[in-house]
Image (cartoon, helix red, strand yellow):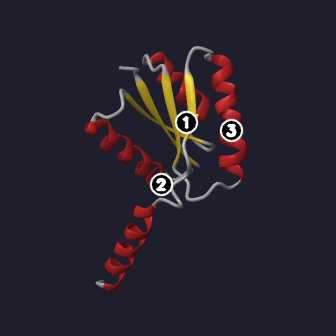
Amino acid sequence: MIPTALLLIAHGSRRAEANADLEHLAGVLRDKGEFAIVQPSYLELCEPGIVSGGDLCVAGGATCVVMLPYFLSAGRHVVEDLTAARQELSCRHPGVSFVLAEPLGRHHLLAEIVAERARQAQAK
């Protein structure tokens, strides 16, 4: 089995509570055990950055790193910044595959999540 890492990528915030959401998600995914490594990373404002996070995945033994943008749409950050980070990581680690996944926005389960949040708000 190829040791695959999941590199979760969020924007990053100066507010620790905002970054805690990604840390929580990483912990849940680690517990599921589907990926050998689950590493949160951030585009800016906190550490580890995307490239540093990718380096940590490789240091942990990953030979394939799925870079998953924790973003709703393929805006400038996903299209330009994450693509540039993927390219930099590929150059730094030529024997490792870095794959950029789609952002969350058009996934069919997102509509269910939005509807659930709306129902929760109505119930208050």
Labels 1 & 3 near each other (Cβ < 8 A): no
Element under disc 1: loop
How many residues crowd mark 3 within 10 Å: few (<14), some (14–19), many (20+)?
some
Which amino acid does the dot numbered 1 rest on?
Answer: Glu
Q: Report whether 59 appears left or right of 1.
A: right
Q: Give the x, y percent position of residue 68.
A: 51, 42
Q: Nearer the viewer, residue 49 or 114?
A: 114
Q: Report whether 112 appears left or right of 84.
A: left
CA–CA distance in space, label 1 to label 3: 19 Å
Q: Quadrant of residue 120?
A: bottom left
Q: Give the x, y percent position of residue 19.
A: 47, 49
Q: Is residue 39 visible?
A: yes
Q: Residue at x 56, y 33 (%)?
A: 99
Question: Circle 1 is placed at which residue position?
Answer: 47
Dot 2 or dot 3: first in sequence order is 2
Question: Circle 3 is placed at which residue position?
Answer: 83
Question: Circle 2 is placed at which residue position?
Answer: 18
Q: Is residue 120 above or below residue 93?
A: below
